[in-house]
Image (cartoon, rainbow, N blue to C red):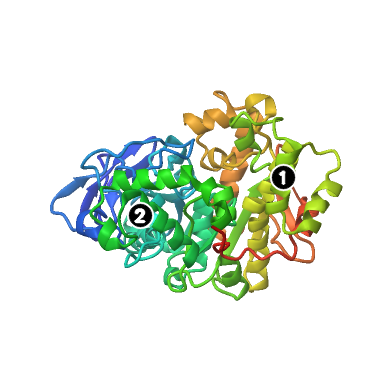
């Protein structure tokens, strides 16, 4: 078939889909990989998509799963009535008639409460043009995906991700991809999902390489997740069980979860750090699907055969502070309180001050939050994977965003538009400006090359991480491979274990 002559048609396991050509890339959007998780399937695990007859047009994204309206940034979408086919996959292929192309599967972030694959920042065409089949998909978030309720399977979001990867294994060859050369990659909550999948025995064999961009350190114990789930159910006046919650409309469940998010400060004595960072949901160490945290699993050799690229931005939390208008307004008392509860211990709190004697309260807050939430979990994941016999490549994104006269620094999420090569759209323009600089364009090209080279060959183009030298690729206008640059933070957190968070026992 001459693919350039007409709209491409592909036979999947469920039926034939018809895509569209766009700028030399065959694009297939909104293909179901599971049945809509509503009605009898509400709060259940994913069920394979029903087959269809004839040819299904795959020219529009599937609807987004219910999105938090209280996070303060992100999509802010209202669920469209009747649009419940949330579990869909999208494929960008440079040549559906090819065979054996490397496959990259993106898992979006969003604080485990927002996210969908239809944002312009996640368009996969630019990466696909680098001789790669690029896959994105929707999975449930918030209470739908991570809420812990009796008789409902834990970690439904992870189950969705596994179902999408199973769809890739079964169907991607028809789009030109190699099912034995699949790389999962994600940022923030998406990186947490990547780490969780590496620790999940049920996901074994579904992917062969992984990229984790800014891994969150927040994984929840079953008691903590169940306690938060009970608070969500209490907002609705029902028991925290699937039987009681399944009849609840998805929007109402979303609103109840938002109410809990907005009142998390009231639960600080019981929920500890989860309440401090206002995160009601995270992957749950349930002892079954997710037997232990990723750091424990990788150190024990789980997924040792999977090559891993992992890293973080230099100024992870600085953007949150700047965008909220708090830059320069954090008080000494606020910084001291943050150091007390967030640093590993009192010695660590002192070490932050002695190691950064000129840091003002805002800088101290941003630094310790960046370390606890993203930087040290990412570093420790490289350490754990290496200790377990795996190969890890570490990076730090150090190029600063030009936005707000440089106030954002090398902030959380800056790597996403650079990796995808999508410099427009809301996020791209916010972080890179309407007209990206030559520096940004060049760095983006280098990162796209590194990520796709890694997917194709298993190496991103720099030396692997080893505990004796801790070589790290510092991504900047002039990138270099050097010993890990955040040595003060590394020493402060050297003996810390990123264990599953537990209830603190307070009221």
| Circle 2 Cα neighbour tier, 10 Å, few/some/many (<14 / 14–19 / ≥20) | many
Q: Which of marks 1 and 2 is in front?
A: 2
Q: Quadrant of the C terminus?
A: bottom right
Which of 256/494 is in front? Answer: 256
Q: Which residue is found at the position 47% from the left and 45% from the top? A: 261
Q: Which residue is found at the position 39% from the left and 64% from the top? A: 154
Which of 86/496 is in front? Answer: 496
- Above or below, 407 against 185 in this view is above
Residue 249: percent from left, percent from top: 25, 47
The quarter of the picture where residue 414 lies is: top right
Q: Residue furthest bottom?
A: 300
Residue 188: percent from left, percent from top: 54, 49
- Above or below, 118 against 226 in this view is above
Q: Name the residue under label 1.
A: 367
- Above or below, 308 against 190 in this view is below
Total tally of numbered discs in the picture: 2
Q: Is residue 490 left or right of residue 233?
A: right
Q: Mark 2 points at which residue?
A: 233
SS category of the residue bearing label 2: helix
């Amino acid at each position: 078939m001459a693919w350039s002559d007409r709209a491409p048609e592909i036979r999947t396991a469920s039926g034939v889909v018809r895509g569209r050509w766009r700028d030399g890339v065959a694009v297939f959007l909104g293909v179901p990989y599971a049945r809509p998780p509503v009605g009898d399937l509400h709060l259940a695990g994913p069920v394979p998509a029903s087959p269809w007859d004839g040819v299904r047009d795959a020219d529009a994204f599937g609807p987004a799963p219910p999105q938090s309206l209280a996070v303060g940034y992100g999509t802010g979408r209202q669920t469209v009535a009747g649009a419940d086919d949330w579990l869909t996959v999208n494929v960008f292929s440079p040549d559906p008639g090819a065979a054996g192309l490397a496959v990259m599967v993106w898992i979006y972030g969003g604080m485990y409460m927002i996210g969908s694959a239809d944002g312009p920042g996640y368009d996969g065409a630019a990466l696909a043009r680098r001789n790669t089949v690029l896959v994105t998909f929707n999975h449930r978030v918030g209470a739908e995906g991570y809420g812990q309720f009796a008789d409902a399977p834990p970690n439904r979001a992870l189950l969705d991700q596994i179902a999408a990867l199973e769809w890739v294994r079964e169907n991607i060859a028809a789009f030109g991809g190699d099912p034995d050369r699949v790389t999962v990659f994600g940022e923030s909550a998406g990186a947490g999902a990547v780490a969780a999948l590496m620790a999940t025995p049920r996901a074994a064999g579904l992917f062969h390489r992984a990229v984790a961009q800014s891994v969150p350190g927040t994984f929840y114990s079953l008691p903590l997740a169940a306690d938060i789930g009970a608070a969500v159910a209490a907002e609705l006046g029902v028991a925290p069980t699937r039987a009681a919650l399944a009849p609840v409309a998805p929007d109402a469940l979303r609103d109840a979860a938002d109410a809990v998010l907005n009142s998390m400060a009231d639960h600080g004595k019981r929920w500890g750090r989860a309440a401090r960072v206002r995160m009601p949901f995270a992957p749950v160490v349930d002892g079954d699907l997710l037997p232990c945290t990723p750091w424990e699993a990788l150190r024990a050799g789980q997924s040792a055969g999977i090559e891993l690229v992992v890293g973080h931005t230099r100024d992870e939390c600085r953007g949150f502070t700047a965008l909220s208008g708090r830059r320069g307004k954090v008080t000494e008392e606020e910084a001291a309180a943050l150091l007390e509860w967030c640093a590993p211990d009192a010695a660590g709190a002192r070490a932050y001050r002695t190691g950064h004697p000129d840091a003002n309260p805002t800088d101290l807050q941003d630094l310790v939050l960046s370390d606890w939430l993203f930087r040290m979990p990412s570093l420790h994941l490289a350490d754990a994977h290496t200790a377990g016999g795996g190969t890890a490549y570490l990076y730090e994104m150090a190029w600063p965003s030009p936005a707000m006269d440089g106030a954002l620094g090398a902030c959380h999420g800056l790597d996403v538009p650079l990796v995808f090569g999508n410099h427009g759209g809301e996020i791209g323009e916010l972080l890179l400006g309407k007209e990206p600089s030559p520096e940004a364009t060049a760095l983006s090209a280098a990162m796209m090359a590194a990520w796709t080279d890694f997917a194709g060959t298993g190496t991103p183009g720099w030396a692997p991480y080893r505990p004796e030298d801790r070589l790290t690729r510092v991504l900047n206008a002039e990138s270099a491979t050097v010993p890990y640059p955040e040595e003060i933070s590394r020493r402060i957190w050297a003996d810390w274990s990123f264990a599953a968070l537990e209830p603190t026992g307070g009221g």
